[in-house]
Image: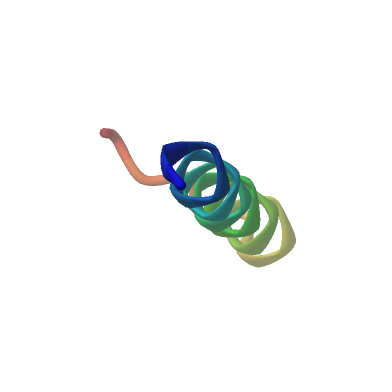
Amino acid sequence: MPEILDLIEAAQQGNERAMENLSGTPKAH
């Protein structure tokens, strides 16, 4: 079920961005 893996990956990336916004220290990817 690759579509589920895509959703999980997208959620993880979104969570990383949210944490960066909260910390105020965006990381360069």
Q: Compare residues 8 and 22 and report the one nearer the observer.
A: 8
Q: Quadrant of the C terminus?
A: top left
Q: Compare residues 1 and 23 and report the one nearer the observer.
A: 1
Q: How far from the left and from the top, in percent, is residue 3?
A: 53, 37
Q: How far from the left and from the top, in percent, is residue 28?
A: 29, 35
Horizontally, residue 11 falls left or right of residue 9, namely right
- Residue drawn at (73%, 62%), measured in percent from left and top? 22
- Residue drawn at (56%, 49%), measured in percent from left and top? 4
- Residue drawn at (63%, 46%), measured in percent from left and top? 14
Q: Quadrant of residue 8?
A: bottom right
Give the residue at the far left of this rendering.
29
Q: How is the image coloured?
A: rainbow
Q: Compare residues 22 and 16 and report the one nearer the observer.
A: 16
Horizontally, residue 13 falls left or right of residue 22, namely left
- Residue drawn at (63%, 66%), measured in percent from left and top? 23
Total labels drawn = 0
Q: Compare residues 21 and 2 and report the one nearer the observer.
A: 2
